[in-house]
Amino acid sequence: MVSDVGFGKFLNLLHSISMEEVISLGVGEPDFTTPWHICEAALTAMKSGFTGYTPSTGFPELRRTVAQDLEKRYSVKYNPDTEIIITVGSSQAMDLAFRSILNLGDEVIMPDPCYICYPSCISLAGGVPVTVPTGVENDFKLEAAQVKTRITPSTRVILLGYPANPTGTEISREALDGIARVALEHDLLVISDEIYSHLTYGTEHTCFSSLPGMKERTIVLDGFSKAYAMTGWRLGFAAGPADLIAVMSKIHQHTMLSPIQHSPEGGRQSSQGRGG
């Protein structure tokens, strides 16, 4: 079977054994279940008949709620109509971002170790992953000086993930400022995977797009999987410049059509196309 290789093989193994005496260290899965009020809202929506297609880029109410949360947490403002898209998990948001940005042979600088799907998503979009080794000597943190050594004429993107999977490393604002200066100096885009942004301890999370000059060249990836134990619900979002979000939306509507979602204000049954 195709799923019996790589990450798919591990997931099949994980679900084939009893977890009563096993602690999995392999997947970013919360050890608690989705809060009941979220499940109850979904049940209410289903009982009310909201089981059809939803707006392709997400319910406007949900996009507004995401924009309000980003402004409240990081003081960074996004237009919910043009700068935010709701996706099938943050993984789809990452895939859309790479497919929207990369041309064949474009290089993406990223830390190593990293989330297992980073290099695959880059390669599938025609890009070339360029890893920057990190280790215990610097707490597995990606540093500006290291990034600069990997830049070539083909470099297009810096990919960050913090708090990091699998190391749990957070990056200080000072270190992020250094990376931002490199991005500005070399006219690079940044994809910042911040799906673990709610799970920081002893430090305050800094959203990369909140740094000076970065909102215009950063796509922030986030979602509901980790903070709200909704990994199986597959609901995430991307926030970024309107022109890039527009391209991501075009790919999204012709590949995934729409994410499953429940509008914060009750939603409404979508009447758009009859895709698969």
Image: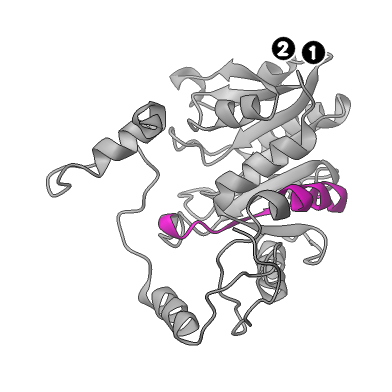
Rendered position, 20 above or below 145: below
Q: Residue at x 43, y 34 (%)?
A: 166
For residue 149, the mark is 2
244 left or right of 162? right
Disc 2 marks a residue whose amino acid type is Thr
For residue 152, the mark is 1
Q: Residue at x 45, y 49 (%)?
A: 201
Q: Position of residue 110 (x, y in %)?
A: 62, 25
Name, please, the residue furthest toward the left: 21
For residue 237, the mark is none
Quadrant, the C terminus: bottom right
Q: Position of residue 145 (x, y in %)?
A: 70, 18
Q: Nearer the viewer, mark 1 or mark 2?
A: 1
| Residue 259 falls in image quadrant | bottom right
- Which residue is at the front of the view, 27 or 2? 2
Disc 1 marks a residue whose amino acid type is Thr
Residue 226 magenta-highlighted = no
Q: Which residues are magenta?
A: 232-251
> What secondary structure predominates along the stretch shown in magenta?
helix
Q: Position of residue 244 (x, y in %)?
A: 82, 46
Q: Residue at x 26, y 40 (%)?
A: 14
Determine whether the residue tagged by mark 1 lies in a helix, strand or loop: loop
